[in-house]
């Protein structure tokens, strides 16, 4: 949709025969309403992406097959849009073409010809006002998405030094049981907060149609292990037993590893959340032909019949007697949407309250004749730490984040220099000639993108490994980082082992 507000207000007129189009255009112009005349529906479809406040048609324009393209366009509208259509008809609702238009085009207002000028103007102004409210919803959604992205950045910034500080404690007190216990608690909570942030961002991305699956050959066993690992903290905290039943042998899936793991993990977390302490949860995986099925059964509070579909709605939560609501109510919605994006399905089963629940995730993603070796998940790669005098420049305007990361890298034998802004980073890179620069993006003054470009232009700058370590994790942020010259884009708070693996190589990371 064009950002030109005048284009967004215009009425697109389609009256293929007679003088209706020209006369209607003059009427609109006389009261300050902008319009454009199209000779047929094909021209209408071409014109609407540039902006449309309302569509005015005569019934001859939607007769027979001419309406098919219009129906497809209306069906493909973004969620905020409900295009107003004014349909001029001589036959009223008795016309078959008019009945089809009312049924398939959605937001249709009928005006019988000959229509009085004042009635046409009033109806048009009414639908334009309604269209403006749709634009307000669109703009509010955009502001919400921008807010969520900013919120994620602001939340991730403090999480990073918290997690890094725990790594320092582990180095300083490797044999202290109390420190280990505290570190595990903090790491679990940081992981939980990070997952909440990621879920919020996924909601925004899906709403805007920005989620694209990255399918590749992956290991079914790796998916199960990773999902179980993610859900292990809540399982342990609630003292649940988790039984895992899987098919014999190895199976390869053509799927998005991160999204599939996220879906299964969300189902396990949901089961743990709604099962009283000391419960029993079963994860059963089966493979049949091209189809893999994940079944998660619990002996928890169960579901009422009317909740079996409602729980997949965004922000829906099942109340638990005597407990305050927890979570955001988006995990199941995301799991179902990711399932459908893979061509699969997700549904819930329960015999009622107190009878436990079962969630069944089915996906047609099994590679029957696997000719390609499954790839391990990026965050499952563990490389040995080999500092060998490697010089690291850490750049972050968050002093705590920079100082704690410097301390942790120093303990691992790296030679570390710190800069707290982009200008200082460029100067430090020129003086110390680092092997690797680990740099924040959202810094005041010169941001990380500009600093990276400047460093690349310095003598030897093309050989430096540039790692963006940032709270900005949208796909557009990763693309901007790549265009600015970064080799890797890591989102705060990053797993320290993953950062170490990037310090060993200059190959790009997704």
Image: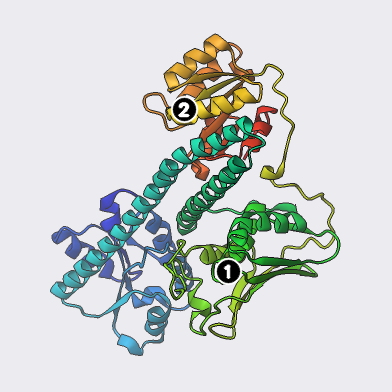
The residue lying at 62 percent from left, 24 percent from top is: 411
Res 36 visible: no
485 versus 228 height, above or below? above
The answer to which of 371 and 202 lies nearer the viewer is 202
Which residue appears farthest toward the bottom when viewing the image?
94
* Count of numbered marks: 2
Task: Indicate the secondary structure of the residue bearing disc 1.
Answer: loop
Residue that numbered label 1 is attached to: 277
Marks 2 and 1: CB-CB under 8 Å? no
Q: Which mark is residue 216?
A: none
Task: Indicate the secondary structure of the residue bearing disc 2.
Answer: loop
Q: CA distance from mark 2 to mark 1?
A: 42 Å
The answer to which of 268 and 489 lies nearer the viewer is 268
* Crowding near the residue tagged with mark 2, few <14, some 14–19, many ≥20 C-alpha atoms within 10 Å: many
Residue that numbered label 2 is attached to: 396
278 versus 113 height, above or below? above
């Amino acid at each position: 949709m064009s950002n030109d507000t005048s284009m967004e207000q215009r009425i697109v007129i389609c009256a293929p025969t007679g003088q209706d189009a020209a006369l209607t255009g003059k009427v609109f112009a006389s009261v300050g309403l902008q319009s454009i005349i199209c000779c047929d529906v094909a021209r209408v479809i071409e014109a609407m992406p540039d902006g449309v406040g309302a569509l005015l048609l005569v019934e001859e324009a939607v007769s027979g097959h001419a309406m098919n393209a219009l129906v497809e366009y209306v069906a493909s509208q973004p969620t905020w849009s409900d295009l107003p259509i004014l349909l001029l008809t001589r036959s009223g609702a008795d016309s078959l073409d008019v009945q089809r238009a009312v049924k398939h085009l959605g937001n249709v207002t009928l005006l019988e010809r000959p229509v009085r000028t004042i009635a046409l103007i009033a109806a048009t102004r009414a639908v334009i006002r309604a269209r403006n409210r749709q634009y307000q919803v669109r703009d509010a959604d955009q502001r919400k998405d921008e807010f969520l992205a900013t919120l994620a950045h602001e939340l991730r910034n403090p999480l990073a030094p918290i997690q890094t500080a725990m790594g320092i404690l582990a180095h300083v007190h490797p044999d202290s049981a109390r420190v280990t216990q505290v570190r595990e608690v903090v790491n679990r909570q940081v992981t939980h907060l990070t997952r909440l942030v990621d879920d919020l961002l996924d909601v925004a991305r899906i709403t805007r149609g920005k989620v694209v699956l990255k399918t590749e050959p992956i290991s079914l066993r790796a998916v199960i292990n990773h999902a179980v690992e993610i859900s292990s903290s809540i399982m342990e905290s609630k003292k649940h037993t988790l039984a895992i039943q899987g098919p014999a042998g190895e199976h390869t899936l053509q799927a998005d590893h991160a999204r599939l793991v996220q879906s299964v993990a969300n189902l396990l977390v949901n089961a743990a959340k709604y099962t009283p302490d000391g419960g029993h949860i079963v994860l059963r995986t089966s493979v049949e032909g091209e189809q893999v099925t994940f079944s998660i059964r619990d002996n928890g509070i169960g579901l009422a019949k009317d909740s079996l579909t409602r729980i997949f709605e965004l922000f829906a939560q099942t109340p638990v007697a005597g407990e305050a609501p927890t979570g955001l109510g988006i995990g199941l919605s995301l799991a179902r949407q990711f399932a459908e994006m893979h061509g699969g399905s997700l549904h819930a089963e329960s015999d009622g309250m107190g009878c436990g629940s079962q969630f069944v995730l089915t996906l047609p993603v099994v590679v029957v004749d696997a000719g390609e070796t499954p790839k391990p998940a990026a965050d499952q790669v563990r490389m040995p730490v080999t500092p060998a005098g490697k010089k690291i420049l850490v750049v972050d305007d968050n002093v705590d984040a920079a100082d704690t990361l410097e301390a942790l890298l120093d303990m691992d034998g790296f030679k570390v220099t710190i800069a707290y802004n982009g200008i200082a980073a460029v100067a430090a890179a020129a003086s110390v000639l680092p092997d690797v620069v680990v740099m924040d993006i959202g810094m005041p003054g010169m941001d990380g993108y500009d600093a990276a470009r400047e460093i690349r232009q310095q003598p030897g700058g093309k050989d430096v490994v540039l790692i963006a370590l940032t709270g900005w994790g949208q796909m557009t942020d990763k693309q901007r980082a790549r265009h600015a010259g970064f080799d890797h884009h890591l989102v705060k708070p990053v797993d320290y082992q993953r950062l170490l693996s990037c310090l060993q190589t200059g190959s790009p990371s997704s």
